[in-house]
Image (cartoon, rainbow, N blue to C red):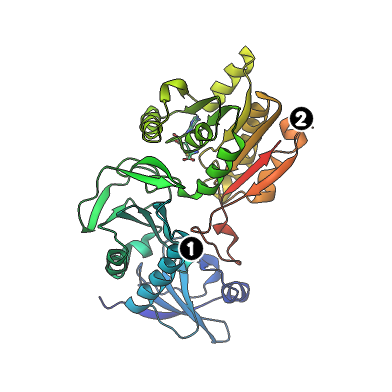
Amino acid sequence: MKRASFDIVLRRGAADSVRRGHPWIFREAVRNMPANAAPGDQAVVRSEEGALIGHAIVDPKSPIVARVWTLGSREIDHALFSERIAVATALRAKLFSTDATTAYRLLNGEGDRAPGFVVDRYAHVAVLRVDGEAALARRDEFAASLWPVLQNIGVMSLAFRGRSDGKSGGELEALFGDKPPATIEVREHGVPFRVDLEKGQKTGAFLDQRENRRRVRALSKGERVLNLFSYAGGFSMSAALGGATHVTSVDVAAAAHATAQASFKLAGLDPSAHSFAAADAFAFLTKAKARGEKWGLIISDPPSFAPNEKSRERALSAYRSLHRACVAVLEPGGIFCASSCSSHVNAEDFLSTLDDEALQSSSLRLTEMHGQPADHPTLPNWPEGRYLKFAVLR
Ligand code: SAH
C-alpha cells in the first residue's frame, strides 16, 4: 500500500534527543503535523534549520506522535522491516543456542529499533503485539516481513494478541501458518511450564523475569517462601525447584493458580505440598502479620502501580506500604525480593520505597539490583525502556 510521506520539523531539544537515539517524538516537539496525516504514514524528520534527521512513522492522535526508525536518509520500507527482524533474530540465535529455553522475546520493539512491534516466541508459536495506532496500521506489512524469518527458525504459527501494552483481554488471532493452540508447554533454563496463550497476560507469560526467577531458585534452599502476585507461578516453581521447604503463592486470579499447578506437575513437583491462596496480597499480608506467620524469602512482583506519569506519586506510596507489609512478615535474616515493572518509576525512585523509613526497619541491606534480560534490549538514550527493577535485600 502506498503511504503518504511528508516533513515534520522538530523543536531544538527534541531534535538533539532524537539524534542521540531517543525513538519517541512527543506532540509538543513537532511544529507542523499535517492535518490529514494518518496513523502509519512516514515522516521525514527535520531540524528547525531544515537539516535531515531521519525517518519516522506517525501516530498523529497519540501523545507520542511519531516513532523514529532511521537516522539519516534511509527510508522505511519492507526491506528495512526485514533487516531489523533479521538482526533481532540473530541476537536470539546466539542467546538461546540450546533448547533449554524455548520461550523468549524475539523482538523488543524500540529496543530492537522496531518501534511499536513486540514478538514473543513460545516454542513453535510466535505472538505479535503492537503498541499504538501507527504500528497497528502497519501490522500486516510487518507480519508479512516477519513470517518468512519465523518459518526459517521453526515457528509454525504467527498469531496476533490484542494491541495494548500488557493488558489482558485481547483476542488471539491467527495471522500466518497453523491455528495457535490455547495453551502451550515451553521450557525456561530446562524447566517446563505451561503458558496460557489465549487468556494469559501480556503475550502469555512474563518472559522478562527469566533471569530473576533463576536467581530466586539459587536463593531458596531450605527457606519457607512467600510469592506475592504469583500469576502463573514462575517464581513459585523456581523456589520449589531450588529446594524451598514450602511455597505460598498469592494472587487474586484463581485461574492463574490453576495454570501454576499444571506447571508444578510438568516440572515433577507436587502442588499439594504447597499453598495457593486466591487473595488480595495486601489483605493476605495483614492477616499473616496478625497471626504471626513469617517467611524466610519473600518475592513481591505486583502489576504496574503507575500506568502513567500522573499516577507516579500514588504508585510510590503504594509500593511503600506493600514493602513495609512484606518486611513485617519477613523472618530475621530473611531475604526480600522486591520488583516493579512500571516504566514511570525509575530505579532510584523504586529504591526509595525500600529505604529504612519506608520499611520501618534498619536491618536490611540492598545486595543485588537486576533488570531485564538480554532478549529485552533497550537503547542507551531511551530510559523509558528500562522498566523492570528487581531488588534483593537481606
Ligand atoms: N510474578 C509474576 C507476574 C505478576 S503479574 C510472574 O513472574 O510471572 C501481576 C499479578 O498480580 C497478576 O497475576 C494479577 O492477577 C495479580 N494481582 C493484581 N492485583 C493483585 C492484588 N491486589 N493482590 C494479589 N494479586 C494481584
Numbered disc 2: secondary structure: loop
Q: CA distance from mark 2 to mark 1?
A: 41 Å
Q: Quadrant of residue 312?
A: top right
Q: In this view of the protein, which residue sits in the foreground, 140 or 257?
A: 257
Q: Up-down: is 178 above or below 213?
A: below
Q: Which residue is mark 2?
A: 361
> In the rendering, at what x and y percent does residue 287 appear?
58, 16
- Which residue is painted at 37% across and 31% down in the image? 265
Residue ranking furthest to the left: 178
User: In the shown orientation, is residue 101 left or right of residue 373?
Assistant: left
- Which residue is painted at 29% across and 65% down in the image? 143
> In the rendering, at what x and y percent does residue 121 appear?
36, 55
> In the rendering, at what x and y percent does residue 331 appear?
68, 24
Q: Amino acid at mark 2?
A: Ser
Quadrant where the C terminus sits is top right
Asked whether residue 375 appears in the rendered view, the answer is yes
User: In the shown orientation, is residue 25 left or right of residue 102?
Assistant: right
Asked whether residue 278 appears in the rendered view, the answer is no
- Which residue is painted at 28% across and 47% down in the image? 171
| Residue 393 numbered tag | none
Q: Amino acid at mark 1?
A: Ile
Return the disc, 2 or 1, that comes first in the chain's sequence.
1
Instruction: Tell me if mark 2 has few (under 14), some (14-19) or many (20+) residues whose alpha carbon lies within 10 angstroms of its own.
Output: few
Q: Up-down: is 386 above or below 34?
A: above
Numbered disc 1: secondary structure: strand
